Image: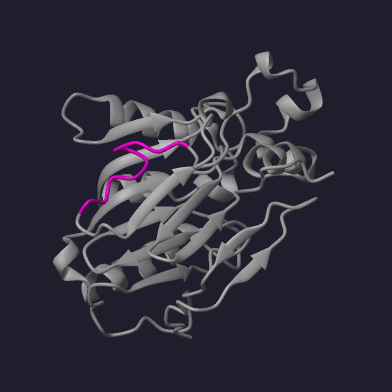
Amino acid sequence: MDYRRLRNSTTLISIGAAVLISMGFFAQVHAALPTSVLPAGQMRAHFINVGQGSSVLLEFSCAAALIDTGGETNNQFDSVQALQDYLDAFFARRSDLKKTFSLVLITHAHIDHTRGLPMVLSHYTVKSYVDNGAETGSGGRQQKAAHAKADASSSGISRQAVTEPEVDVKDGLSSKIISPISCDKDIQFHAMWGALQPSGGWTKIVLNDQNDSSVVTRLDFGKTSFLFMGDLEEDVHQAMADFFCDKPLR
């Protein structure tokens, strides 16, 4: 299913108590990979079936980005193999991208978001890597290994860990690592949330819930916006809404 950019439409999405974001919508829900190379001014969002978990491939005319790597592995389903098969087919079609991700972003260190990360880092070229810095939790081992690989002097990977206090501007936190794609001026990534810190006055329950430290990411593509929430829980939605809205939504 291939939705073209709807430049004149607006959808309001409510997050928890309510973060309202204006979105034109263009997406691809995976049934079969399209055969065309994208022209300038278009993009595709591939929501990949990784079972329990999440993985989204963002395809542009000149680059690709990946948010999360699934997923679920059991006797019936292997999310790592499913993800690799999908990405191999994608790069076979988009041979111009040379099996390269300009950005790989992991929202948080749970295994249903990090399971395929070692495969991605070993099979494809990654230029920028972003996560919340955690090295504990069910997906902490994968993030720790990613940190070590990115930090190696020969890796060629730029790495940034996003914490919630750093997201201190109304447009969200951005940098050349968070938003590394410069071949199309329409593409802008912003981190809207990150790892919670004890100095923020959060309760122990909230601090210990790694979902609440998800890196929330907004992608702006021209007049179109996507918001990728990770697994951010309702107990911090209000704080995020209050910060990004002009007036607290209470």
Q: Is residue 200 in the magenta section? A: no
Residue 113 position, x and y percent, is: 54, 48
| Left or right position of 37 against 15 | left
Residue 165 in the image: above or below residue 142: above
Q: Nearer the viewer, residue 102 or 6?
A: 6
Q: Say whether residue 87 is left or right of residue 192.
A: left
The percent position of residue 52, horizontal first and vertical second, equals 63, 59
Looking at the picture, how far across and down is residue 244, in whole percent?
63, 42
Looking at the picture, does residue 224 appear above or below residue 6? Answer: above
- Residue visible at 38% across and 31% down? 160
Q: Residue at x 47, y 74 (%)?
A: 27
Q: How is the image coloured?
A: one colour
> Which residues are the magenta region?
173-182
Place of residue 201 in the rendered image (x, y in percent of width and height, measured from the top left): 74, 18
Residue 158: quarter of image: top left
Left or right: 15, with 114 as reference point: right
The image quarter containing residue 100 is bottom left
Q: Quadrant of residue 42?
A: bottom left
The residue drawn where x is 24% and y is 25% is 152
